[in-house]
């Protein structure tokens, strides 16, 4: 189910509060009971109509969310196929600069990760502070930086140049964290990510 946007929730609460207050006000100001009940009937009808409108709005949002998720799922499946088959990857646009296929696969997967964070940020599941913390760790690594160096300009052009302020805010935060990571020093090479000799959890290596 799609998350109800915060603005929509606020609107519903304010609308119901206002209509309830008007209903109480009607009974207080109108002495004639018949007139009071008539006015109250109009207000109740208004409340019911508001409920119908809100319900239809939520249904439309859920339908759009379901359609978007279906499109994203199809896109992910296509990407997974291209990551495993160089011949299929050649059906996509060529890289901005020639690179080994293995590096190309890593950058594509890093883009999927970034897309997941983008979706979570847009939905409000990840706030700015959590996003900055996540990106700070992400950009310590070689592939995270390589991905943003390779495709960051496309994110910035598509988001900041568009009409969605929250999308622009996401791209701006990513660019800010990337620049901070570069200023902090070299990235951790992928060759230094893992070791075959014990683990960090092994007491002998602590």
Image (cartoon, grey):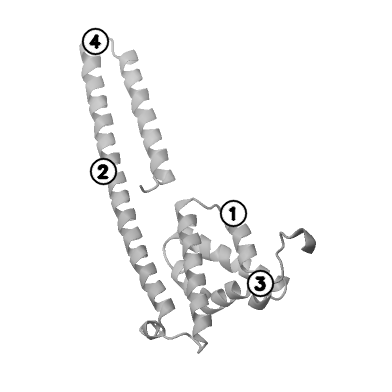
User: Could you tell me which residue is drawn at 32 percent across and 21 percent down?
Assistant: 23
Q: Earlier in the sequence, mark 3 or mark 1?
A: 1
Q: Which residue is mark 4?
A: 33
User: Which percent across, then down, holds residue 40?
Assistant: 26, 20
User: Which percent across, then down, holds residue 20?
Assistant: 35, 24
Q: Are marks 2 and 1 in contact (CB under 8 Å)?
A: no
User: Which percent across, then down, holds residue 111?
Assistant: 49, 71
| Circle 1 SS class | helix
Q: Which residue is mark 1?
A: 130
Q: Are marks 1 and 4 in contact (CB under 8 Å)?
A: no
Q: Is residue 194 above or below residue 61?
A: below
| Circle 3 SS class | loop
Q: CA distance from mark 3 to mark 1?
A: 23 Å
Would you call the spot at circle 3 few (<14 residues within 10 Å), some (14-19), or many (20 or more)? few
Q: Are marks 2 and 3 in contact (CB under 8 Å)?
A: no
Q: CA distance from mark 1 to mark 4?
A: 56 Å
* Front position among marks 2 and 1: 1
């Amino acid at each position: 189910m799609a998350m109800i946007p915060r603005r929509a929730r606020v609107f519903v609460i304010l609308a119901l509060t206002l209509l309830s207050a008007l209903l109480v006000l009607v009974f207080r100001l109108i002495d004639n009971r018949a007139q009071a009940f008539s006015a109250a009937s109009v207000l109740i009808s208004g409340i019911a109509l508001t409920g119908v409108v809100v319900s239809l709005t939520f249904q439309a949002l859920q339908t759009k969310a379901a359609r978007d998720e279906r499109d994203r799922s199809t896109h992910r499946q296509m990407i997974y196929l291209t990551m495993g088959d160089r011949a299929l990857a050649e059906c996509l646009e060529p890289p901005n600069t020639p690179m080994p296929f293995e590096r190309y696969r890593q950058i594509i997967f890093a883009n999927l990760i970034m897309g997941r964070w983008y979706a979570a940020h847009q939905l409000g599941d990840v706030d700015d502070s959590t996003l900055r913390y996540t990106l700070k760790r992400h950009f310590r690594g070689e592939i995270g930086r390589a991905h943003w160096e390779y495709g960051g300009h496309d994110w910035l052009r598509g988001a900041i140049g568009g009409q969605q302020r929250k999308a622009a805010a996401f791209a701006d935060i990513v660019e800010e964290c990337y620049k901070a990571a570069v200023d902090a020093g070299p990235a951790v090479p992928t060759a230094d990510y893992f070791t075959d000799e014990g683990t960090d959890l092994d007491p002998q290596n602590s």
